[in-house]
Amino acid sequence: MPDTLTTKILREHLAGGALVPGEEVALRVDQALLQDATGTMAGLQYLELRDGPVRVPLAVQYVDHNVIQLDFKNPDDHRFLQAFCAKHGIYYSRPGNGICHYLHVERFARPGQILIGADSHTTTSGALGMLAIGAGGLDVAIALAGLPFELETPRVVGVALRGRLRPWVQPKDVILELLRRRGVRGGLGRVFEFFGEGVATIDVTGRATICNMIAELGATTGVFPSDERTREWLRAQRREDQWIPLAADPGATYEEVEEIDLDALEPLIAKPSSPGNVVPVREVAGTEVEQVCVGSSVNSGYEDLAIVAAVLRERTIHPNLVLTVTPGSRQILDTIARSGVYGDLLRAGARMLEPICGPCVGMGQAPPSGVVSVRTFNRNFPGRSGTVNDQVYLCSPATAAATALRGVIADPRDLGEPPAPTPALADPAVDDRHILAPAPPDQAATIQIPRGPNIQPPPPQEPLPDSLVGRVLIHVGDDISTGDLSPDGVEVMGYRSNVPAMSRYVFRRIDPEFAGRARDWGGGFIVAGHNYGQGSSREHAALAPKQLDVRAVFAKSFARIHRRNLIAQGIVPLAIVGEEAYEAAREGDAWEVPGVRAALAQGERALMVRIRETGQEVPVEANLSPRERQVLLAGGLLAHVRAGGRPISLSLGQSGAVDQGSPVTNPVPQETTR
Ligand code: MIC
């Protein structure tokens, strides 16, 4: 039977289970990606599993998120990470070197391989024909230890791209169109695979934009075929030898299909405060704007910045707004500096930032109160920018440039003929000196890993009790983001390696009393609507509630990565059936799930919650795979694996338990050694 590209890659990496949508499979991992805001905790958990070199062919740790050094916390983390990587066989990309997703596409992503990353936008590398999947830090730590990655087999959605984008319409508008059609829950359990003649008209930077924001659909990932455009990219990156042609077999069928007529698209924009709140730019044109930000892990490629520079060349940004521009990597920064794009932006009035995630995660450049900020970023969840009640819009670089010029949201088509962007240099500045190779085995053994005072171990994992008993700590609506649970921004993200301190901020935006109440009430439960835990992969959104002794979350539905993070930390995710439990929930009521341990052990799905105050009994469901049940019984993934818990992998030639004592081997394949 003809296969989709996704199925081909999955099959090639299958280490256990069967490729049946909805069923769990174990996958062999080729590459792992970590960044600093998730990396320290992943590293600490790895060290609880083993102290030898990683057992994944390639692992790279980037420093790009927590790069504001207000005090010792972030620099201490970076020092920890540098030593941890040198000792354990992981490449270390220094701060200032670039944003993990850009750098990974430039230097490491490879067609046909599987990448697991502790960041939801790991999906970006799908631009080069690989399956690149975001996961929690502990899941990545387990992959680093050489165990397979376990995943619910996704459904494959074919996205047929027809025709060619018209002037001023950009790849960002393609992904905004998918978000307009499907919303932030429309990709759950799905891989979006692009095909059709329109694919060849989109370059790798554009594909990276689309694959990055696939995460906003709640999708597992997105993937483009590996074709001549891929080859061109790899050639420019001096990695052409890593190119292989890859596409779906002719006649492959998809479970769902989206047809996008590129010629018919117009500039789109996501309104506050959800990436799924998409409308045509002309619907909101004329809205006054006081900040425009270009470039984060999406839209900071050369082509993205060159179009903004071309629009602003020999012009000046509107006096009522501030424009920031972030290049995606040192390579892009060097290239725009040499091509003249940097000068055009600078003279137009842009504040040029270093290549980091920056304002996208509230690391500086918070907008003023009560004003509109227009950004080419991927997320605009409430408060993420660092300003309470922010009004952040998400759009393409062309729309951002037109807006920066006019001072109001502007449809770039109103600017007339598009100017010619300064062409990229034929030879980008490929320079890996700032991606530090791990130490050779004899030196690695002697490396000490410094732990600053802010670096604290994760909360312990205890076996699941016989019954769950506690009070409803909070009752919230749909689309709670991980930023609500573990806030973005300089202040709180500095506690990424200190869960006890971070736990003070859980639900800070929605209910500042939450953490105090959870402590006073001895922990309890969270009751929520749909898509609980949307957004980032940060396991801190489970770790911090765990620290407050949150024992279960009852929700109408869960976001994929967060659901996994809850299970990994031993918090039971229970699905609300119908509206009954949701409507019955009142903050402060005592809830009980009697016999939960036995029920999970016996594979039961239907459970009952008893509400002590009213005597009411409401149904909930444990929609858990057999392995997830085992993990929860053990009290979390670390406890499960340490106790010798077997992953579903049987064909890897591994015992499934972690071998603590294997000899040090060169962890990086020859062709990527530099
Ligand atoms: C994000 O875009 O939300 C982040 C910040 O990159 C997160 C990672 C994190 O919280 O450290 C993500 O996407 O996973």
Image (cartoon, rainbow, N blue to C red):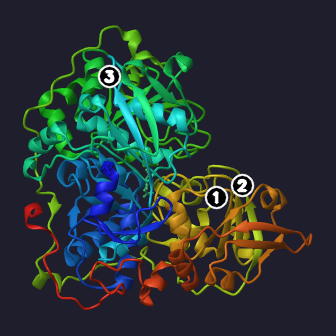
Q: Mark 2 or mark 3: which is in front?
A: 3
Asked if the residues shown at circle 2 and circle 1 are in contact, with their CB atoms under 8 angstroms apart, the answer is yes
User: Residue lying farthest top?
Assistant: 416
Q: Residues within 10 Å of mark 1 (few under 14, many from 20)?
A: many
Q: Locate residue 583: give its quadrant.
A: bottom right
Q: Locate residue 359: give its quadrant.
A: top left
The image shows residue 486 at horizontal and vertical percentages of 54, 60
Q: Residue 475, can we see it?
A: yes
The secondary structure type at the circle numbered 3 is: loop
Q: Amino acid at mark 1?
A: Phe
Q: Amino acid at mark 3?
A: Gly
Q: Is residue 239 above or below residue 63?
A: above
In primary-sequence order, the first of circles 3 and 1 is 3
Residue linked to disc 3:
163
Q: Residues within 10 Å of mark 3 (few under 14, many from 20)?
A: some
In primary-sequence order, the first of circles 2 and 1 is 2
> For the C terminus, which image quadrant?
bottom left
Q: Amino acid at mark 2?
A: Val
Identify the residue shown where x is 53% and y is 71%: 543
Residue linked to disc 2:
476
Q: Residue 66, can we see it?
A: no
Q: Looking at mark 2, is its residue's CB closer than 8 Å to ligand 1?
A: no
> Mark number for residue 507?
1
Q: Residues within 10 Å of mark 2 (few under 14, many from 20)?
A: many
